[in-house]
């Protein structure tokens, strides 16, 4: 996952402030990240991960607990079948030594398309053309396939709905952590590259943040800190068939599929 970047502050009524950012999920593994979903309920599919095997053997479908969710984005874009809980934005308060004290916020964007949007780098096995297009929008689909090829990214600009984390009333030094696969529903080659971080001072101003360097090796000093309530939507949600179970807006920060993309060839 890439670190958060392209920060923008926006005030929203009533008396709320959000910090928007770009995010990018990158597949840097040995094979594609592919999930095939089958209809479970009105707005959800169970999904199996399709994993390549070495030696020319056929691919295998793994049950990992993954889900596809029919996710509402905004009035213009409508809804899409996306990978549920693909990534999460977290805001942690830091002490004077750069250690996490408590998690004070999470962002509303949790579901991602996992598509081939832009090819990056020169990774072995990376196709030159798109294999996985934009995620499907047809609501009555019984099955759906989504994925990201090796060396391709699924990127969301800071202007994309729900690519933000709320910072209302927060003051001092914090770290924003972008965490891929927070529910551990992706079979990965590596688990140690699922997070990226950026230290910021709030209220946010561009330039030097004058905060201690983040120490990711030390566990939070306030243990057992529960997640705060999920963020409220920024605009009324529509009724009718386009309405999805995930009714939150997200302004995606730059995340990378570094961990989720690291699929092991069995």
Image (cartoon, rainbow, N blue to C red):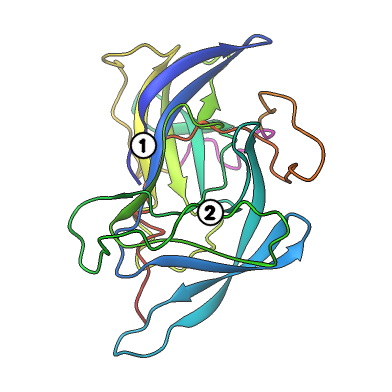
Please tell me whether residue 202 is drawn above or below residue 52 in the rendered image: above
Disc number for residue 30: none
Q: Which residue does the numbered mark 2 point to in the structure image?
A: 135
Residue at the left extreme, as displayed: 122
Q: Residue 198: where, in percent of width, then height?
A: 35, 31
The rendered magenta stretch, by its main secondary structure, is classed as: loop
Circle 1 — which element?
strand
Please tell me whether residue 166 is drawn above or below residue 137 in the rendered image: above
| Residue drawn 53% across the image and 54% down it | 135
Please tell me whether residue 72 is drawn above or below residue 151 in the rendered image: above
Q: Which residues are magenta?
A: 220-230
Q: In the figure, residue 261 lies in which quadrant?
A: bottom left
Query: Is 120 situated left or right of 26 in this image?
Result: left
Q: Residue 151: where, in percent of width, then height?
A: 28, 57
Query: Can you tell which of label 2 and label 1 is closer to the viewer?
Result: 2
The reply to whether the magenta stretch includes residue 224 is: yes
Query: Few, some or many C-alpha atoms within 10 Å of disc 2 (few <14, some 14-19, many ≥20)?
Result: many
Which of the two residues, 250 or 118, is positioned nearer the viewer here? Answer: 118
Q: Quadrant location of the C terminus?
A: bottom left
Q: Residue 106: where, in percent of width, then height?
A: 57, 34
- Please indicate, yes or no, whether residue 31 appears anywhere in the rendered image: yes
Q: CA distance from mark 2 to mark 1?
A: 27 Å
Query: Is 18 situated left or right of 207 in this image?
Result: right
Q: Which residue does the numbered mark 1 point to in the structure image?
A: 197
């Amino acid at each position: 996952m890439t670190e958060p970047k392209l920060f923008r502050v926006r005030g929203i009524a009533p008396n709320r402030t959000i910090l928007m950012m770009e995010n990018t999920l990158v597949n840097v593994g040995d094979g594609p990240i592919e999930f095939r979903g089958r209809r479970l309920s009105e707005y959800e599919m169970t999904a199996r991960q399709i994993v390549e095997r070495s030696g020319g053997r056929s691919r295998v479908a793994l049950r990992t607990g993954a889900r596809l969710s029919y996710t509402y984005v905004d009035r213009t874009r409508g809804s899409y079948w996306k990978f549920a809980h693909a990534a999460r934005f977290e805001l942690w308060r830091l002490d004077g030594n750069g250690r996490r004290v408590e998690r004070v916020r999470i962002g509303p964007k949790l579901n991602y398309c996992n598509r081939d949007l832009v090819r990056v780098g020169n990774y072995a096995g990376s196709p030159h053309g798109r294999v996985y297009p934009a995620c499907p929008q047809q609501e009555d689909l019984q099955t759906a396939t989504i994925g990201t090829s090796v060396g391709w990214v699924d990127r969301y600009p800071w202007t994309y709905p729900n690519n933000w984390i709320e910072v209302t009333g927060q003051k001092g030094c914090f770290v924003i952590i972008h965490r891929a696969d927070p529910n551990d529903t992706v079979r990965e080659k590596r688990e140690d590259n699922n997070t990226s971080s950026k230290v910021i001072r709030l209220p946010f101003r561009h330039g030097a943040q004058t905060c201690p360097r983040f120490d990711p090796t030390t566990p939070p000093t306030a243990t057992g800190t529960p997640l705060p309530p999920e963020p409220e939507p920024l605009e009324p949600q529509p009724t009718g068939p386009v309405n999805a179970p995930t009714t939150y807006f997200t302004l995606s920060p730059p995340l990378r599929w570094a961990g989720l993309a690291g699929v092991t060839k069995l």
